[in-house]
Image (cartoon, rainbow, N blue to C red):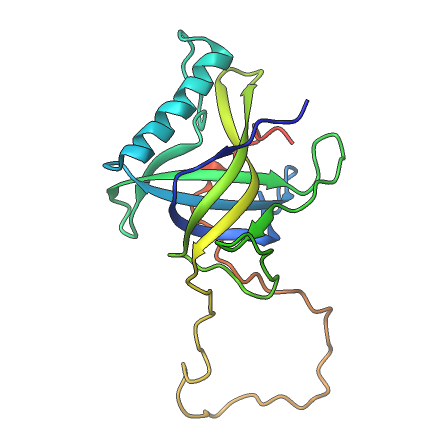
């Protein structure tokens, strides 16, 4: 039976890793590749309030009204600003593993513009872009205690693009200085592709409860 797809309200897209997956839990036994994106919605917005109510009801439908969410049991939280202070925004996390726990490879999430045109892989989606996220839900129970609901990333529609661009570092150090200069004879290591999107410093989303 196909999974039911739901669509979020329009909001601000953050930390988009939907064109190329990022690495989570790096260096740990649970390290894995994962597509992901976060969505910010105003707590004062009626559509956002209805969205939160829908997700809470999905949790209750799966686990019962007497159940309480465990750690990271709900896929949203209050967004913190750069100073770590609470804002009047909710932050929603959508994730999709490249390979499931059963070893099944998943396709990338579909990404499109406002007209439904497939998104080009070389146009990165920067923070501050706006859009909607299509997703399915997954409810889970941790054997060690705690129940939860996760949002499986299925597709993204970008309605307004703020294109990601890396900071210009060409003039960061000013004029050349005395010191080592490359000779061309240095030992070369294999090239590792640099991640083009920032990884969120908050690790509270890195829950192993994501079922894939």
Find residue 134 and report its horizontal and vertical position in percent. 52, 39
Q: Is residue 21 above or below residue 186?
A: above
The quarter of the rendered structure image containing the N terminus is: top right
Residue located 26% across and 51% down the image: 83
Say whether residue 99 is left or right of residue 73: right
Find residue 170 and report its horizontal and vertical position in percent. 46, 83
Q: Is residue 172 above or below residue 128?
A: below
Find residue 173 and report its horizontal and vertical position in percent. 41, 83
Q: How many marks?
A: 0
Residue located 45% across and 24% down the image: 73
The quarter of the rendered structure image containing the C terminus is: top right
Residue located 44% across and 77% down the image: 168
| Residue ranking furthest to the front | 115
Q: Which of 153 and 21 lies nearest the eye of the viewer?
A: 153
Q: Which of 177 and 46 lies nearest the eye of the viewer?
A: 46
Give residue 24's quadrant in the image: top right
Q: Is residue 96 above or below residue 209?
A: below
Residue located 67% across and 43% down the image: 98
Q: Which of 22 and 109 lies nearest the eye of the viewer?
A: 109
Give residue 143's quadrant in the image: top right
């Amino acid at each position: 039976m196909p999974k039911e797809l739901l669509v979020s309200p329009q909001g601000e897209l953050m930390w988009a890793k939907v064109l190329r997956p990022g690495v989570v839990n790096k260096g740990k036994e649970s390290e894995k590749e994962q597509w992901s994106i976060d969505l910010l919605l105003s707590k004062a917005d009626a559509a956002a309030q209805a969205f939160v109510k829908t997700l809470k009801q999905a949790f209750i439908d799966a686990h019962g009204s007497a159940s309480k969410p465990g750690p990271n049991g709900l896929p949203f939280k209050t967004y913190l600003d750069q100073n770590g202070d609470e804002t009047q925004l909710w932050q929603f996390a959508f994730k999709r593993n490249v390979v499931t726990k059963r070893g099944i490879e998943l396709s990338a999430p579909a990404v499109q513009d406002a007209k439904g045109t497939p998104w080009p892989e070389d146009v990165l989606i920067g923070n501050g872009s706006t859009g909607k996220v299509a997703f399915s839900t997954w409810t889970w129970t941790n054997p060690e205690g705690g129940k939860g609901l996760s949002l499986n990333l299925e597709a993204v529609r970008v309605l307004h693009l703020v294109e990601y661009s890396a900071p210009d570092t060409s003039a960061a150090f000013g004029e050349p200085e005395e010191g080592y200069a490359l000779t061309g004879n240095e030992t070369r290591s294999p090239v590792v592709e640099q991640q083009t999107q920032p990884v969120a410093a908050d690790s509270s989303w890195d829950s192993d409860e994501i079922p894939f």
